[in-house]
Amino acid sequence: MADEQTGVSETEIAVHWHEEEYYSPPESFIQQANLKDPEIREKFRIENFPDYFAEYGELLQWDRKWDQVFDGSNPPFWRWFVGGRLNASVNCIDRHLASNRNKAAFYFVPENPDEMRQVITYQDLYVRVNEFAALLRDFAGVKKGDRVTIHMPMVAELPIAMLACARLGAIHSVVFGGFSGQACADRIIDSESHILITMDGYYRSGKWLNHKEKADVAVERAEQAGQHVDKVLIFERHPGRYSSDTPLTEGRDFIVNELLSQFRGARVEPESMKAEDPLFLMYTSGSTGKPKGVQHSTGGYLSYVTATSKNILDIHPEDVYWCMADIGWITGHSYIVYGPLSLGASSIIYEGVPSYPHANRPFEIAEELGVNIFHTSPTAIRGLRMAKDINPQKYNYHFKLMVTVGEPIEPDVWRWYYHVIGRDEAVIVDTWWQTETGGFLCSTVPALDKMKPGSAGPGVPGIHPVIFDDEGHEIQAGSGRGGNICIRNPWPGTLQTIWKDPERFVRTYYGKYCKNPDSKDWRDWPYMAGDGAMLASDGYFRILGRIDDVINVAGHRLGTKELESAVLRLDEVAEAAVIAAQDDLKGTVPELYVSLQPNVVPSDELSQRIVNAIVSEIGPIARPRKVWIVPDLPKTRSGKIMRRILASISNNKEIGDVTTLANPEVVDTIHQLVRS
Ligand code: PRX
């Protein structure tokens, strides 16, 4: 059985279930909210599926209106807004020009506070996206349907590159800037990109990072695997001055800032895309060593992120919105780029780490730019809470709404966020969703539902979640039992497939709970998210975390197998197992258990090389907190490594019965090593 189908075992869920109190949104928020119709959930009840989603399509500008809201004739390859045609860049830019040409689309805030911020109006964005699209088309030969890999830091040129691809109908595949050259290569190879867009370097924690060197690694490794990269297009972080020590490769590497002068004033007719044409790929970790290319559509995805940005983030044109996520993750795609721009919002792109050069930087930026919607992760909130010199009171800002996303938030941390950062006046939405789902699945509707610390809330309107046990029986609300959270119905933001691997798509998300693989009825095809959850009697879901071989480090998703395969490349290593260890700041972090080949002697040098292997294969976010070199790993008689036992040891939890293992004695040895 593919381990992506391995469900949660109820007995493995040990949660201290304890009901939290509710908090209500203030009247002033309710008055101004985009969504305050108390009948909304009634309108979006499952009996009215799929017609209620037509309302989402209406939020977009179409070249040709759709004929059919939903086509479920080939489950689970759902099609949305069938027959419709549109262009995402037109929806995010052109349609705002008539009334909002001079409004800020983005504020780019460099990490160094002495460097001037940039304001990019919708007109600027229009000009820059068109010019870069012309360059991509006429210089780089990019055409509709081509995949273009973008490996960039948090700068305004990143959404410009994405939107230029969208204008041409090319499929962008953005790789998180912190990922290594190898990780970028893997994505170039899988998506068969001929073009890589990158940047010379950027600032993080006050340091200049050479980013171009990763492009060299990426292209070289891709070539080795038979994937030719024709051109590397390099933006300059300091326009007019190439700032990397890494030399340019003649005929392959080109400085975008130099080429752009040939395209000044260029305009590119936007491609009229079918609603179902893919807009982008985003690679994410699954249960196997290879990240999967999650494919999102143009019409369904854009309508879904637009609607949820409006209804859940409550973005109005006059708001200043700051999402601290990186655009290289799905949160940035959906809720920095596509959703907010589609609504004509003004939002912030911040280059660096939020605590640079001091812990109060987020509040300083909020005060300076008038931020009133603040979007971040539990890890960032914990970081702020732990910082010694934090003093939000000193700053004059007012948040009407705050978001938490990416990992479960502890009720205590939630309350601190509410009282100290939100000053008891900001509404909090805890939004649960995934790369695959395009947009929010569970969250309170901020003006309508009370908040409950630690619980994401009910399904957002139109999303009907359910919890199943391992046998597919529904777990009732308020039973205090955990299980697999699934969504009963399809929705427009859902992934279309996994790039080049439709079978993996079906198996991973529908394999376990599909009631009948021959059925043409969407009701028989619940979507399995891969998270454990509990449902309280008030209809609120509390997310417990991943049930598969995926770990969540500071809200970033990593596959344990990806880390393990990086380590297994070292000749000295015999076996490796990665587990999620609890961490006060990051929620969970990887810890690594390895056994060595016969006659290899453990040493600090070897441990360091093991860590380096992970960092260079994946990136610093995957750095294990600890490497335990052990004589053997605990295994079942069939040879499966029992990661659960190792996790219990790392997390100082009850280990349970080990007598059925093939090598129970090793558990004691490891336990002593870790405790010593
Ligand atoms: O385990 C859930 C956790 O993050 C996973 C999805 O990760 P990724 O695809 O990288 O997308 C992150 C941004 C949406 C989920 O399977 N997760 C996400 N949001 C929450 C969460 N866990 C608890 N509470 C959340 N609000």
Image: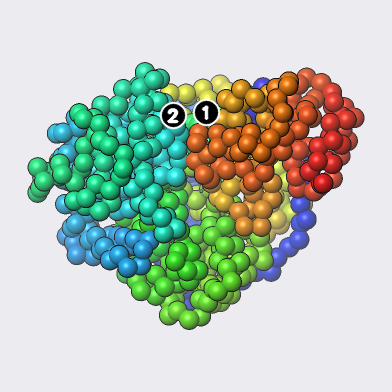
- Answer left or right for 218 relative to 431: left
Secondary element at image label 1: loop
**Residue at (32%, 68%) from the top-left corner?**
114
| Rendered position, 256 above or below 357 | above
- Answer left or right for 254 relative to 506: left
Q: Amino acid at mark 1?
A: Lys
Q: Are marks 2 and 1 in contact (CB under 8 Å)?
A: yes
Splitting the image into 4 quarters, where does residue 134 fall? top left
Task: Say which residue label 1 marks.
Answer: 290
Residue 643 position within the rendered picture, expressed as x and y whole percent measured from the top left: 73, 34
Task: Say which residue label 2 marks.
Answer: 186
Q: Is residue 571 visible?
A: yes
Foreground: 239 or 229? 239
Foreground: 32 or 114? 114
Splitting the image into 4 quarters, where does residue 262 fall? top left
Secondary element at image label 2: helix
Does label 2 or label 1 sit earlier along the sequence? 2
Q: Quadrant of the N terminus?
A: top right
